[in-house]
Amino acid sequence: MASALSAPAASAVAAARCKVFGGGRNDGRAGCRVGVARKGCDFQLCTMPQAFRTILSHAESYLGCWCLLGFRLRMTPIRTFPSNSIFQRPFSSASRDRVNTSHITMAVAVDASRFEGVPMAPPDPILGVSEAFKADTSDLKLNLGVGAYRTEELQPAVLNVVKKAEKLMLEKGENKEYLPIEGFAAFNKATADLLLGADNPVIKQGRVATLQSLSGTGSLRLAAAFIQRYFPDAKVLISSPTWGNHKNIFNDARVPWSEYRYYDPKTVGLDFEGMIADIQAAPEGSFVLLHGCAHNPTGIDPTPEQWEKLADVIEEKKHMPFFDVAYQGFASGSLDEDASSVRLFVKRGLEVFVAQSYSKNLGLYAERIGAINVICSAPEVADRVKSQLKRLARPMYSNPPIHGAKIVANVVGDPTMFGEWKEEMEQMAGRIKNVRQKLYDSLTAKDQSGKDWSFILSQIGMFSFTGLNRPQSDNMTDKWHIYMTKDGRISLAGLNLAKCEYLADAIIDSFHNVN
């Protein structure tokens, strides 16, 4: 009898699937087929990993019978045995004792996976931060990577007005029927009113094509598909830097893009002259992707006067403005103020694309609720645009989910809940402003170098662009257990007042001691 299996071999055997012909046992793992047969059978011994050689050399002692081990991709025997073959019947313990193991040979045939050409994808640069954070056991760790709001206790928050809306929905009862392709009608009206103002002439004139879509990402992706189909020669201009998923979205839709200057590392501010020059130099009729408020990742927005100048240049060059509005009400605390850039372009009579999201301002991250709006020159144009957006949405995701849409429609449509929502938004925006101020105060008090940290206060929204480079950002994580994106962005929404001094120590150390 063969010796007992080593621990690695036993583990490999335990992980493998085996089929005993005649015994009916099937435990399996894909990869290769192994046969055990009398000498003289027409088998070919194939190259195989050493672990499986070990398994085969101990196959009799492990299985206690003649068998065909089925490490398989396709569970087919290597050879068909005649009816009088020893493999066609199970063995008693007595018959096993009479087996002469010197008459045994072993064979293996390996099947390659059809997925051999599929490489491993790299981790997502933003969501991967959370995975690394979870694996860290330090009590000092901070997750400032993902843009999700946290309470002062650094816990996820569900808005009270959302709980109230859901309670009312539950009491009324709701079905789970499919929505139309364009989404929930009450939501579409509410979201357009919120973006443009309910009394805006373009709404009254029927010049707005609105489709509920899958939050900001889904809305951007649907618009990208529209651009690719109906403006195949157009290029999209994207700020440098921008939200990490913007480039992925347009790449996936096969829409060409280029960057315009936005961030000035020397001033840690807006490079407005470079921005204007690049937009002016772009081919006429380009799409210009603009962040409606609270630019991600820099937190740097143009002034009202700069927005006017941008509108002049875009109109002159016959470009199409395309706004990504992910933080309406969450940046300044005012829904109207945060929509002022979009409303300026619409008031000037420009046709405009706008993607919206309710992940941040209502905390509906997992509901995937948003919209794509296209403001057109005439009602009949809006009708045609909407029909083609629906046509593109149908094979992409068919129709959107209902739960988040009903929450938004109920909150915006009810004066009492709408007022409560605005109060909660002001509180969230206020908490982030307080954290921003405390971080600035801590940096100024602790850093004796005389460095000007005032750019922290000039930024807006949930993010701060620290100016730290990649090695410095790595030091923040490796030494201080502070998780952030490698471009130096931190999410102030994931910070509280109690941790500001610790964060300031980490930033000062990384900035001055790491090149």
Image: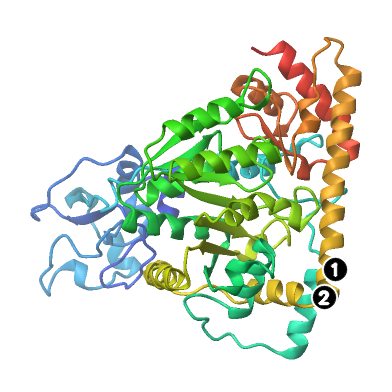
Q: Residues within 10 Å of mark 2 (few under 14, many from 20)?
A: few
In front here: 489 or 254? 254
Find disc 2 in the rendering and name its residue.
415
Q: CA distance from mark 1 to mark 2?
A: 6 Å
Q: Residue at left 62%, top 34%?
A: 485
| Residue 203 pos. (x, y %) | 60, 70
* Quarter of the image where one finds residue 481: top right
Question: What amino acid does circle 1 point to?
Answer: Gly
Label number found at residue 230: none
Q: Secondary structure at mark 1?
A: helix
**Residue 493 vs residue 8: left or right?**
right
Expressed as whole percent of the image width and height from the top left, the position of residue 188 reads: 60, 73
Which structural element holds mark 2? helix
Left or right: where does residue 95 sit relative to residue 252? left
Seen from the viewer's position, the closer of residues 376 and 373 is: 376
Q: Is residue 314 left or right of residue 227?
A: right
For this view, does 381 lie left or right of residue 339? left
Which quadrant would the C terminus be assigned to in this image? top right
How many numbered callouts? 2
In terms of image quadrants, where is residue 68?
bottom left
Q: Alpha-carbon neighbours of circle 1 within 10 Å: few (<14), some, or many (≥20)?
A: some
Location of mark 1 (residue): 419
Q: Are marks 1 and 2 in contact (CB under 8 Å)?
A: yes
Front position in the image: 505 or 162: 162
Residue 454 position within the rendered picture, expressed as x and y whole percent measured from the top left: 81, 25
